[in-house]
Amino acid sequence: MSGHSKWKTIAHKKGLADAKRGKIFSKVGRELMIVARSGGGNPDNNPTLRALIAKARSVNMPMDNVERAIKKGTGELGGGQLEEVAYEGFAPGGVAIVVKALTDNKNRAASEIRHIFTKFGSNLAGQGAVSRNFKRKGQILVNATGIEEDKLMGIVLDAGAEDMKQEEGIFEIVTEVADFFSVLEALEKAGIKPESSELTMIPDMYVRVTDKSIASTVMRMIEALEDNDDVQNVYSNLDVDETVLADMEQQK
């Protein structure tokens, strides 16, 4: 999303995450297992694992949980075998949706995710039809309170950040994957703790939705997908019109 609606949605999702912290820990733990299994349990030699550990810290996941998940992934502790699967499609209004899942039962995951798409009047698409319009990037969010924009911009750009912008009291810092850790390290040295930091998928273009019914349907669909136990991440190019979003919030 972009503009006012983007940051309102981030705040909304953060509230959902706080309310479902146990589920968030479970999802991050599964991801840690997969990444440790494929690339090893040493974050110095596994950049993706290092990014996930940073993500775990940003959601206040206990380090005991993090270490246990890594050991399950490397085989030091017993754990179920998980597979990575991806689904993509289009929601009402032409909004693109990419779903990343980790599951021990691909048939169940496919059935449940297909059901959610169908329930909200959406259609699955072939692999690559949607995801090719997203780019893998590092995304760091910093609370703007008490931080000078010029100073922060100097820190992150010197460390290799691609872009930084401020809206609704939040600085969004975007990096190439290769520069993600150097920017995080620069922030840490400056004593700045991000609100969140992760490797994510950012769309090339957003679809602006001005119809309240469509916006509500797509947002409920995204929440239903995120609530599924197998789903790790949901990415979309949804951009809700500010007036529509404000109207929706007033009616809650």
Image (cartoon, rainbow, N blue to C red):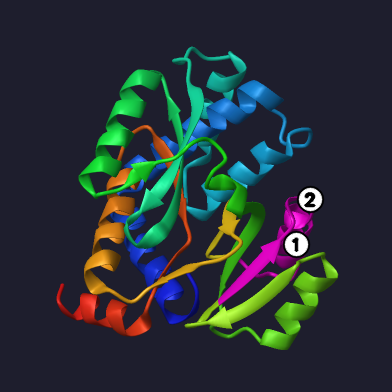
Can residue 65 be spotted in the picture?
no
Residue type, mark 2 in image: Ala
Can residue 130 be spotted in the picture?
yes
- Image spot of residue 178 (x, y percent): 79, 50
Tell me if 102 is positioned left or right of 112 in this view. right
Q: Are marks 2 and 1 in contact (CB under 8 Å)?
A: no
- Image spot of residue 46 (x, y percent): 73, 34
Q: Is residue 180 magenta?
A: yes
- Report the magenta residues as a range: 171-193
Circle 1 residue: 183
Q: Identify the element where label 2 is drawn.
A: helix
| Residue projecting furthest to the right | 158
Q: Is residue 181 above or below residue 170?
A: above
Tell me if 110 is positioned left or right of 145 in this view. left
Q: Identify the element where label 1 is drawn.
A: helix
- Image spot of residue 235 (x, y percent): 47, 52
Q: Quadrant of the C terminus?
A: bottom left
**Camera-side residue of 204 and 69:** 204
Residue 104 sits in quarter: top left
Q: State which mark lies toward you, 2 or 1.
A: 2
Circle 2 residue: 178
Q: Which mark is residue 110?
A: none
Q: Is residue 191 above or below residue 132?
A: below
Q: Residue at x 51, y 67 (%)?
A: 206
Numbered marks: total: 2
Q: Residue at x 31, y 35 (%)?
A: 114
Residue 174 sits in quarter: bottom right
Q: Residue at x 40, y 59 (%)?
A: 94
